[in-house]
């Protein structure tokens, strides 16, 4: 069974408690948490300063709102390149590793089975190959550490990163066996990458984020959306995906992601996703007397190798 969740960072102008209350009022049982430096009440710096108090207060707020956590997304800098995991500074990379370990503990405290991280930035003044190799080293370390905790660590490909193209994603997957993805089609559609190429990444996805996007537009209203969500949902069921699709509108000046009415678009996309999911759920319903798949962050395992899929 595929379940829907909602990103708290769609509504950053509200205090944390009110964000959670709004997500629940919009009809969601699950929330994607963005632990971002620009997110009021959910900053990595706050987690580092008082990790136990941070986790306890956060857990209380979630229980009060009646929400469970589907994913924790960690971004250590004010933007995707600031303090990214593959910077040349060993001091920054060491600090980021400590923050990652605290984020894993936070997931355990919140009973969240999934943690999302970014691959690393692409920098003009740093050799591209060096940035890519550092990114693989850091993501590989995080994947290895998380694999022993019962929490799945997934890498999110995105614009302005070393992992912005489908080919670079496959290179990551080849280099780090067992690595999964938090997949957001918007980051590919905005670069005019076709749906067929992005669909090929679905077997490696352990979490999905969804928002309207179009060519050269990372975020648009649902009525202008060019993401093939219907095709995505069909293929998720074909691959026996059992995780979440998070409605994840972002409010940020980056790539003009502050030009949408996030509350309205969250509702519109949620309703559209429900319509896409309904016939697939009926078709894939378990026979009477058997239990259907519960919501979880697991898809079919083990995933096929990237090279095998490309050769098929």
Image: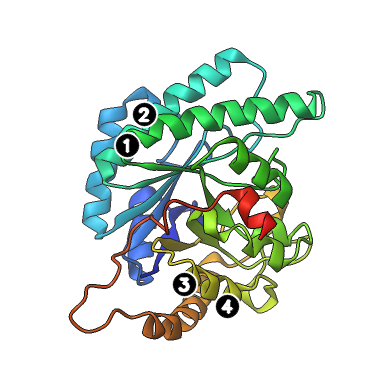
Q: Residue at x 26, y 46 (%)?
A: 111
Q: CA separation, marks 2 and 4? A: 37 Å
Residue 165 visible in the picture: no
Residue placed under numbered mark 2 in the picture: 102
Whichever of labels 3 and 2 marks the residue nearer the N terminus, that label is 2
Q: Earlier in the sequence, mark 4 or mark 1?
A: 1
Q: Residue furthest left?
A: 289
Q: How far apart are the two marked residues, 4 and 1, measured between alpha carbons?
A: 34 Å
In this view, which residue lies farthest toward the top?
Answer: 91
What is the C-alpha distance between the residues marked 4 and 3?
Answer: 11 Å
- Asked if the residue at tag 1 contacts the one at tag 4, i.e. Cβ–Cβ closer than 8 Å, the answer is no
- Relative height, residue 151 to residue 277 (above, below): above
First in residue order: circle 4 vs circle 3: 4
- Crowding at label 4, few (<14), some or many (≥20) Cα neighbours within 10 Å? some
Local crowd at mark 1 within 10 Å, few (<14), some, or many (≥20)?
Answer: many
Q: CB of mark 2 within 8 Å of CB of mark 4?
A: no
Compare marks 3 and 1 and give the one earlier in the sequence: 1
Contact check, label 1 and label 2, Cβ < 8 Å: yes
- Of circles 3 and 1, the one toward us is 3
Residue at 53% in and 49% down:
181
Report which residue position mark 1 lands on.
106
Q: Nearer the viewer, residue 115 or 32?
A: 115
Q: For residue 84, which quarter of the picture?
A: top right
Image side of residue 230 versus residue 114, left or right: right
Q: How many marks?
A: 4
Q: Is residue 54 left or right of residue 188?
A: left
């Amino acid at each position: 069974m595929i379940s829907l969740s909602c990103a708290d960072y769609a509504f950053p102008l509200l205090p944390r408690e009110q964000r959670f209350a709004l997500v629940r009022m919009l009809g969601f049982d699950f929330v994607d948490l963005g632990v971002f430096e620009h997110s009021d009440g959910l900053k990595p710096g706050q987690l580092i300063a008082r990790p136990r108090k941070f986790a306890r207060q956060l857990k209380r707020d979630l229980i009060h709102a009646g929400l469970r956590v589907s994913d924790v997304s960690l971004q250590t800098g004010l933007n995707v390149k600031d303090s990214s995991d593959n910077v040349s500074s060993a001091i920054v990379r060491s600090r980021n590793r400590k923050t990652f370990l605290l984020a894993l503990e936070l997931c355990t405290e919140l009973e969240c089975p999934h943690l999302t991280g970014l691959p690393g930035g692409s920098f003009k003044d740093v050799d591209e190959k060096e940035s890519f190799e550092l990114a693989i080293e850091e993501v590989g370390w995080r994947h290895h550490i998380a694999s022993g905790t019962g929490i799945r660590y997934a890498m999110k490909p995105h614009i302005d990163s070393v992992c912005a193209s489908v080919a670079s994603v496959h290179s990551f997957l080849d280099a780090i066996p067992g690595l999964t993805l938090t997949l957001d089609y918007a980051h590919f559609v905005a670069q005019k990458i076709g749906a067929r190429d992005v669909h090929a990444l679905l077997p490696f996805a352990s979490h999905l984020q969804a928002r309207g996007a179009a060519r050269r537009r990372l975020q648009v209203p649902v009525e202008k959306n060019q993401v093939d969500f219907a095709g995505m949902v069909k293929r998720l069921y074909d691959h026996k995906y059992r995780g979440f699709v998070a409605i994840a509108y972002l409010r940020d000046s980056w790539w003009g992601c502050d030009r949408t009415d996030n509350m309205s678009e969250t509702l519109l996309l949620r309703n559209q996703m429900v319509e896409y999911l309904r016939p697939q759920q009926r078709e894939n319903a378990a026979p009477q007397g058997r239990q259907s798949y519960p919501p979880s962050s697991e898809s079919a395992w083990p995933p096929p190798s990237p090279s095998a899929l490309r050769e098929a």
